[in-house]
Amino acid sequence: MNLIETKDLCKKYGDKLVIDHVNMHVPEKAIYGFVGENGSGKTTIMRLVTGLANPTSGEYSLFGVDYKDRKINEAKKQISAIVETVSLVPSLTAKQNMIYQELYQGIKLSEKERETLLKKVRLSDVENKKVKNYSLGMRQRLGIALALMSKPKLMFLDEPMNGLDPEGIAELRDLLIELNQKDGITVLISSHILSELEKIASCYGFISKGKLIEEISAEELQKRCKKSLNLKVGNLEAAKEILANLELKDVNVYPNGDIKIFDDIKVNKVVMAFDKAGVELLGIHTSEGSVEDYYLDLVKGVEQ
């Protein structure tokens, strides 16, 4: 079952189309890594499917409930979101922030439930410390504790790793894995720190300039992120002819002169072929594939 589905979802601000016919699928109990450049539309989509903004056209569903159905408000009660910023009162302690949030949400937790949540996010030892004295990582974890108060089945996190030091990133990563695997919470997370996203995501959605380019499982992505021989050339047409003569089967060629060869071929064979043809190589190196490389290749492919 997909907890989120969108169909040709669009959003315009004035004459500018910022979300362009997006068809998105977030499976139940997944950690969905949402990848895109600044301004690609990630936050806007989160705002649309959480009800913070209305679609210009298209539709979406949550937990199988269409957004125009009256039952959508009940479905949204199963969602928690931290979009753009964590809302905390700096002059209050962690527990006081929780009580403040309870009043805002119209819920009531017992003292034991508050302590359990703070223990889950590793803040038990600083529960009486004012939030203004917290590190950024501690504030992020407290924000997640507040998001967990309503016992959500689906959580949205918009760039939660921004500004965190390595220790803070590791703590947040471990917490998200625990929430997903032990508590069964589905997580939609956007992040620019793709090396960390690789460690937790079970599937991905790649978006650029308002268009969802591809959705892919982590397992399939791992297969596609293979070792490559990367070339930089000045004469692209001549380079294409050389590559054709080498009878390579798995090559990506980009308009800016970048070439990625995924075939198993020795570097010196490629260098000799270019040298023999009198075509200058401006650069050459090998690399292991990563989520970032894959995304950049997708974007280049779309721009061709």
Image: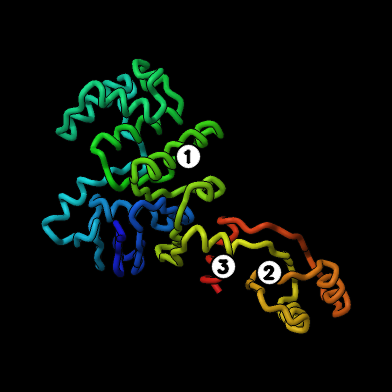
Please name the residue that numbered disc 2 is placed on: 262
Q: Quadrant of the C terminus?
A: bottom right
Q: Left or right of 296: which side holds 281?
A: right
Q: Which type of secondary structure does the marked residue at label 2 adopt?
A: loop
Task: Decide which of tag 2 and tag 3 comes sooner along the chain.
Answer: 2
* Residue at figure coordinates x 26%, y 46% from the top left: 79
Specify the label residue 300 is tagged with. 3
Q: Considering only vertical position in the picture, is 125 above or below 189?
A: above
- Gap in angstroms between the C-alphas marked 2 and 3: 16 Å
Tell me whether the residue at label 3 lies in contact with that at label 1, contact meaning CB atoms closer than 8 angstroms.
no
Depth check, front residue: 15 or 170: 170
Do tag 1 and tag 2 residues touch (Cβ < 8 Å)? Answer: no
Residue 239 in the image: x percent, y percent?
A: 75, 77
Q: Position of residue 277 (x, y in %)?
A: 85, 80
Who comes first in sequence, dot 1 or dot 2? Answer: 1
Q: What amino acid is labelled 1 in the image? A: Arg
Residue 127 in percent (x, y) is at 35, 19
Crowd band around label 1 with a 10 angstrom C-alpha radius: few (<14), some (14–19), many (20+): some
In the displayed orientation, state which residue is furthest to the top: 128
Q: Amino acid at mark 2?
A: Phe
- Residue denoted by label 1: 173
Of discs 3 and 1, which sits in the foreground? 1
